[in-house]
Amino acid sequence: MVYILPKNPTRPDYTYVKEYNRILKARRTTPDSSIVMLVPPDLDALCAAHILTTLFGRDDANLRTIPVSGFKNLQDVKDSLLEEKDVSYTRVSDLVPGLFTALLTFAIALQQVRTIILLNIGALLDIAGDEWFEAFPSKVTIHIVDSSRPVDLHNLFGRGGSIEGGMDGPRVVVWDDGHAEKLTKERLAFDAEEFGFDSSSDDEFDDEDEDDATEEDEADDYEEDEDGSRKRRRSGSDDGRQARRRRKRHEGDSLARQEAREQRRKHQQVLSNYYSSGAHHGQSAAGVVYILASELGYADNDVLWLAILGLTHQYLAASITRDQYEAYHTIFSNEVGRLNPPVTTASKGFGDDAGVRPSTELRFPLLRKWNLYDAMYHSGYVANKLAVWQEIGISKLNRLLTKMGLSQKQAQQSFMYMNSELRESLPDQLDNIGAESGLIELSYPSFTKSYGNEMQRTSAADVLAGVGALLEAAKGVRLTVEVEGGRGGGELFGGERIWDLRKQTGRGKDGVVHRNSDHGQTSRSGNGQAEGGDVEESEVTGEQMFDGQPVSVHNFWTAFDALGNNTSLLRQSLPLAIAIQKAIVRQGCEILGKKRIQFFPEFRFVKINEGPDLATFAHPMTLTRLVLWLIEATRDRIPLIHAQRLVTGKGRKSYPYVIACHNPSRRAYIVVGVTGAPEIGEVRKK
C-alpha cells in the first residue's frame, strides 16, 4: 500500500502521472474491460468520473463504470467482480475440456480486471483487508481517489507491495493531496502497532524470564572441582547472593516491560485520536483528477468546468471551510484565465462566448432560473435572518424588497427578464440595504459557463442543483414542476405540470435519448434500456425498479449524461431542481413553524412521519439538504454550541442535527446526521 502525490521530488516514481501510465501499461496486456471504476451517487464523484472517462478515452482505454450506493452495495459489487475472476480461471475447465480449455481460459483471462478505481468511497475502509479486496489476484491494483478523511492507515502505510515491484506491486494506491505527508506521528504509531508488537509479547516475555531465571539459578547451584567435575554448591551465604541477583534481574526486566507498555499505550492513543477526530474532507476528487489532466496536457474548459463543479459542491455542502474554498478558487481562477481568452465586445453576444468566466454569486438558490422573490424566500441564509416561516418574516422580506425599489411584480418576474439596470445593481443594493436586516456576506466568488446557443450562461451552483435533482428524483418521485413562463396557474392552466423525464428531455418514439457522443468510452454496468416503462416495486427487495434496473441506477446515468454533452437534459433539469428546493423549504418551514425539533443533551432530533413530500425525502441526498437548510436557517436562532462548555472553557463543541424520515415502502427510517458550525463558512468535523 502506497500513496502518491501530484509531484514528488523525493520519490519521483510516486506521482499521479507515473501511476496513470502504469494503469495504461497494465491495460495494454488486457485490452478489454481491464479498468473498472466504482462511483457512488455523489456529485463530486460524478465529476471526477467524467474527467477520468475523458482522459482514458483520449488514450483509447475503455472504462467499465459501475454505480455503487453505500458499503453494502460496494460489497455486492466486489463479490460480483470476484465471481468474474473465478469464472475466468476456474469454471471454464468444467465447461470445455482439453487444449481448447487452456486457450479459452487464456482468452477470458485477458479480459480480467487489472485496475479498480474507487471514487469518493473506500478511504475509510481497510481495502486490502479480508473483508474487502484481499481475495483478488495480486496483479489487481485498487486506486482510491477520495476526499474523505480520515483515511484508513492500512491504505496509506500498510505492507502490500511497492511500485518498484511492477504490475504485481502495490495492492492499494491512495491518490493523496499532501495529507499523508503530515501524518508523521500516526505513521510511527501505526508501524509500531502493526509490525513491532505482538498481542502476547508480555506473556512470552514473562515465560522467557522465568526460563532464564531457572537456568541461571540451576547453574549457580553447582561449582566445578579442580578436575572439572561439577558438584552442588553448599547452601548458606550463597543463597542471599542468588536472591539479590534474581531480584535485580527481575527489577530490570519489569522496568523494560513497563516502558514498553507505556510506549504502546501512547501509540494506541495516537491512533485512537486520529480515527476519532471526526469525518472531514480534503481536496475534491474532481480536483485531484484535474491535476492529473493538467500534468498530462489534457486540461481544457470542459475538464476545468467539472473540477470547478466538484469544488463548488464541497463548499455548498459544507464539506470544506470558506478559507479552503477560496484557496482552491484562486487556483482555478488562474486556470480559467489561462484557458479562456479575455472577453471582447464581439464575444459578449449570446452564444458567442462559450467559455468559463469568474462570477460573484448571491446565496439565493437558482436565481438565474427563478425570480428574486422566490430565490430569496427559499434561501436558508435569508430564512435565518428574517424567519420566513413566520408571517412577520414574510413581511420583513416584502419590506426589504420595497426599500430596494422593487415592486412585487418586478420581484416575481423571471430574473433573466428583469430590467438589466436593476439586475446589475442588485448586489450593491443588497450590500447597502440588506445589512439593516443582518444580510451580510450574501455573496461568494464562483464561476459561470456558457453552453453556446443551447443554453444561457449558468453558474456552477445551478448546474449542481440540476444534476443533483436528476440524481435524486429523475425517476421514482412524483413532483410538480413549473412550466417556463407560467407561474401559479396550476396544471389546469398550464402553469405547472407533473415532472416526466420523457416529456422533459424530448425522447423519441423509440425511447432513446438523442444526445451528442460522450467519447464512446464508458461501458455501463447495470444500465438497461432507456426510458420506456413505469416505476415498479421489486417483490424481492422492495426497491423501486425501472426497465429492469433499480431507479437509483437509472437516475445515476441520467445525471451522468447531464454532466456531459446533453445540455438539453441539463436545461430541463432546472425546473425539477426548483421543485425539490420548494419541497425542502416547505418541509423545513413546517418543522420550524410547529417547533418539531427535539432537544437532547448531545444532539437535535427531527422525525418526519407524514406529509406530501415524504417520498421526496426518501433519498439520503435530499434529506441531507434538508438538514443543511435547517442548520442554516437556525444558525443564529437555536444554539449550535454547548453553553456549559462555553462557561467552563472546555472548548466549543457543536450540536449535531439528526433527522429521520419514514420510508413506508421499505417500512424503515432513513437517518442522516450533520454537525453544523456556529459561523457561516466554518466546518465542524462530523
Image: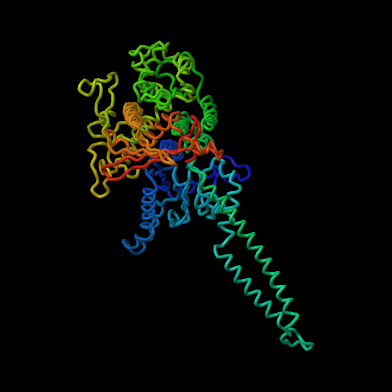
Numbered circles on residues, count: 0
Vertical side of 63 occupied by 637: above or below: above
**Which of these two is toward me, 562 or 176?**
176
Q: Position of residue 549 (x, y in %)?
A: 28, 43
Residue depicted at 36% across the width and 20% down the height: 392
Vertical side of 48 occupied by 366: above or below: above
Instruction: Specify whether 265 is left or right of 554.
Output: right
Q: Residue furthest left?
A: 492
Check the image and tell me how it is coloured: rainbow
Vertical side of 457 occupied by 622: above or below: below
**Is any part of residue 521 visible from this angle?**
no
Q: Position of residue 360 (x, y in %)?
A: 47, 22
Residue depicted at 28% across the width and 19% down the height: 487
Q: Position of residue 218 (x, y in %)?
A: 68, 80
**Is any part of residue 436 visible from this angle?**
yes
Instruction: Specify whether 159 is left or right of 133.
Output: right
Q: Position of residue 443 (x, y in %)?
A: 47, 23
Q: Which quadrant of the figure has residue 93?
A: bottom left
Residue depicted at 71% across the width and 69% down the height: 248
